[in-house]
Amino acid sequence: MKFWFITGSQMMYGEDTLRQVEADSREIAAGLQLPFPVIYQCTVKSNEEIVNVIRQANYDPECAGVITFCHTFSPSKMWINGLNLLQKPWLHFHTQYHASIPDDAIDMDYMNLHQSAHGDREHGYIGARMRIPRAVAAGHWQDPAVQQKIADWQRAAIGVQFSRDLKIVRFGDNMRQVAVTEGDKVGVQMSLGWQVNTWAVGDLVKEMDAVTDSEINVLTDEYASLYTMSGADQEAVRYQARIEIGIERMLKRTGAKAFTNTFEDLHGMRQLPGLAVQHLMQKGYGFGAEGDWKTAGLGAVIKAMYPDGQAAFMEDYTYDYSHELILGAHMLEVDPSIAANRPRIAVHPLGIGGKEPPARLIFEGRAGDAKAVSLIDAGGRLRLIAQDVECVKPFQPMPNLPVARTMWRPQPDFLRGMECWIIAGGAHHTVLSFDISDTALADFARIMHLELVRITASTTPKSLERDLLLGDVIYRSVY
Ligand code: MN
């Protein structure tokens, strides 16, 4: 994926100045240290040139977003027709070629060339006037702080591009009677692009039956290279490998990057998928248990934004009031990408579901600052809730708990953090991400028109209630 750098100007300055504008713009674009490449495209000087380059950006599948900068003054009525067509994420980079004012060298030629201080204000006006969602990053282009801001926006734009193509396979429906895992799949496809469709569990079983012993050998060798396997029932592990190969074949055939299942619909399967799902998540697939397709999609998007990052399907399980910690885990399916130690494979019976004891990975989650992120259907709109949390090393070995586990303390503090989460309607399923930044979250939500609810160190239940009331007014009237 690439990002297009487009410089705004006009014909008035003459060829020499425009040549310098182009040379400086090339240097700025090439000098940005970012996770994804920025390619200088052109310096636009007319309505026709702007319409033309925006059309090209829209239809280039490798263009993930557009960065604009007005080195000189670029009258904004020239931009209206082009910006009306823009379908890619937009960042207005308010920078300047030189970092300081040269005392001797500054003259009127210099002033005519280096005037983004007012050229970009004209550009900012039209963005505001047209109410186009855009990120604004101000700072000298060599400043790491402004580059970080652009990097965050790039992550969001990559998430947008991925989201607009995302397919989610559901094996079975969601768990009966559960509300938060429901939602408007048509509405979500309209806003996020997600194609959420169901496949029969019987088709998966047929796929699993076709897996050969030698294919299973290859995958169990991979398990052995990643995880400690000693003592685990080999037949149970091999059955998980069969499940994984079957699921991944169906995902690949469909072009899906996320999936769900439910323990209430495992017809023809001998085990609930555990290790199989955990390894698929480690490979980058999004997953939601109990049919939770919104968390599956959210997990896949965050993994696409941070391909080498750490993001896990998670469930708030139980509390320790004396240590002020939440224990997060799941029946089986915790993503080993957040593991602090080498996961080990174990086979234990499950209390529910009525199937054979499944193989699963057991490990402790890593410590560090993270965000618990939840996407809910708020009725007529989606609400993205993100709470800052501090993950800590579990303080007890919990030898009889046969699942992966992690512990965290929510912001602003343990009890207020819980109150805020409940007030906002956050789900019991989340994506726990150690990577996603405030800026990337805000950029993603802005581009996608999502209501973003942040719970941070400065949030109080009272301030949150007010935010939610305002959100109701805003999202009912604007979108
Ligand atoms: Mn669950």
Image: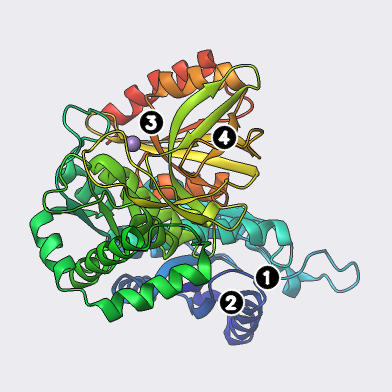
The answer to whether the residue labelled 4 contacts the one labelled 1, judged by CB atoms less than 8 Å apart, is: no
Q: Amino acid at mark 2?
A: Tyr
CA separation in Å, label 4 and label 3: 22 Å
Q: Which residue is mark 3?
A: 428
Residue at the image position 56 percent from the left and 56 percent from the top: 152
Q: Which residue is mark 4?
A: 398
Q: Position of residue 197 (x, y in %)?
A: 14, 53
Q: Which mark lies nearer to you, 4 or 3?
A: 4
Q: Amino acid at mark 1?
A: Asn
Among the two numbered marks 2 and 4 on one chain, the one whose residue lies closer to the N terminus: 2
Neighbour tally class for label 4: few under 14, some 14-19, many 20 plus, Cα within 10 Å: few
The answer to whether the residue labelled 2 contacts the one labelled 4, judged by CB atoms less than 8 Å apart, is: no
Q: Position of residue 56 (x, y in %)?
A: 33, 77
CA separation in Å, label 3 and label 2: 59 Å
Q: Amino acid at mark 4?
A: Met
Whether residue 80 is visible here, answered yes or no, is no
| Quadrant of the drawing holding the N terminus | bottom left
Among the two numbered marks 3 and 1 on one chain, the one whose residue lies closer to the N terminus: 1
Q: Which mark lies nearer to you, 4 or 1?
A: 4
Neighbour tally class for label 3: few under 14, some 14-19, many 20 plus, Cα within 10 Å: some
Neighbour tally class for label 2: few under 14, some 14-19, many 20 plus, Cα within 10 Å: some
Among the two numbered marks 3 and 2 on one chain, the one whose residue lies closer to the N terminus: 2
Residue at the image position 49 percent from the left and 65 percent from the top: 307
Q: Which mark lies nearer to you, 3 or 2?
A: 3
Q: Which residue is mark 2?
A: 13
Q: Which residue is mark 1?
A: 112
| Quadrant of the drawing holding the C terminus | top left
